Image (cartoon, helix red, strand yellow):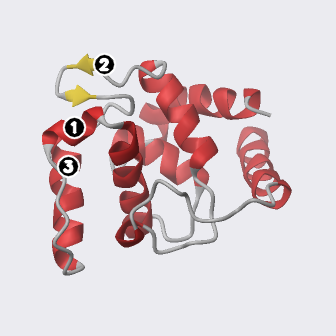
Amino acid sequence: MIKLFRVVLFSVCLLVTNPAMGANATADSEAVKTENFDWEPVMKAIVQVESEGNTRAVKGNSCGAMQITPILVAECNNILKKRNSKKRYTLRDRFSLEKSKEMFLLMQSQFNPLNDIEKAIRSWNGGNKYSVKRTQRYFEKVMKCLRSQK
């Protein structure tokens, strides 16, 4: 319970203390529903945990700095199709940090409209129906990186 309180408190502090809460400059306009939230610190922490910034990282089906799977690329393309966008991502786009961040933002706009940092981190690791128990270690690593950014 105390851990959860600390996470919530940290999330609120992050929101309140960051006055530069504008839309991310790398995000495609179709990818961002909530334009007043800055996901950059979270994405930076995820990149650090996933690949230490290596855009050429490959582990199994996961590729790039954010370790994106083919299923996530397909899901992003489904979202874009539903939004009547002509834009589509390719598997090669996983090796582009800019396009990887666009995919992250697109997923957040679709499945995390309230910009819940914990949900974003856990779902990036465990999918939209993540298990708190199975994503706990990953969540802690990303939060540690987030804290060290300050």
Q: Position of residue 59 (x, y in %)?
A: 24, 18
Which residue occupies 44% across, 60% down?
A: 108
SS under mark 3: helix
Neighbour class for label 2 at 10 Å: few (<14), some, many (≥20)?
Answer: some
Which part of the image, by quadrant, shows the N terminus? Answer: top right
Q: Where 138 sits versus 9, above or below?
A: above
Residue 128 visible (yes or no): no
Which residue occupies 17% across, 60% down?
A: 88
Which residue occupies 19% across, 81% down?
A: 84
**How much space separates mark 1 and mark 3, taking CA atoms?**
7 Å
Q: Position of residue 111 (x, y in %)?
A: 39, 65
Residue 99 visible (yes or no): yes
Q: Which mark is residue 69?
A: 1
Q: Nearer the viewer, residue 55 or 6?
A: 55
Amino acid type of the residue tagged 1 in the rendering? Thr
**How much space separates mark 2 and mark 3, taking CA atoms?**
16 Å
Q: Nearer the viewer, residue 81 or 28?
A: 28
Q: Position of residue 31 (x, y in %)?
A: 38, 66
Query: Which residue corresponds to mark 2?
Result: 57
Asked if residue 12 lies left or right of residue 99, the reply is right
Amino acid type of the residue tagged 3 in the rendering? Val
Upstream in sequence: badge 2 or badge 3 = 2
Q: Nearer the viewer, residue 98 or 37?
A: 98
Residue 66, located in which quarter of the rendered image? Answer: top left
Query: Which residue corresponds to mark 3?
Result: 73
**How much space separates mark 2 and mark 1, taking CA atoms?**
12 Å
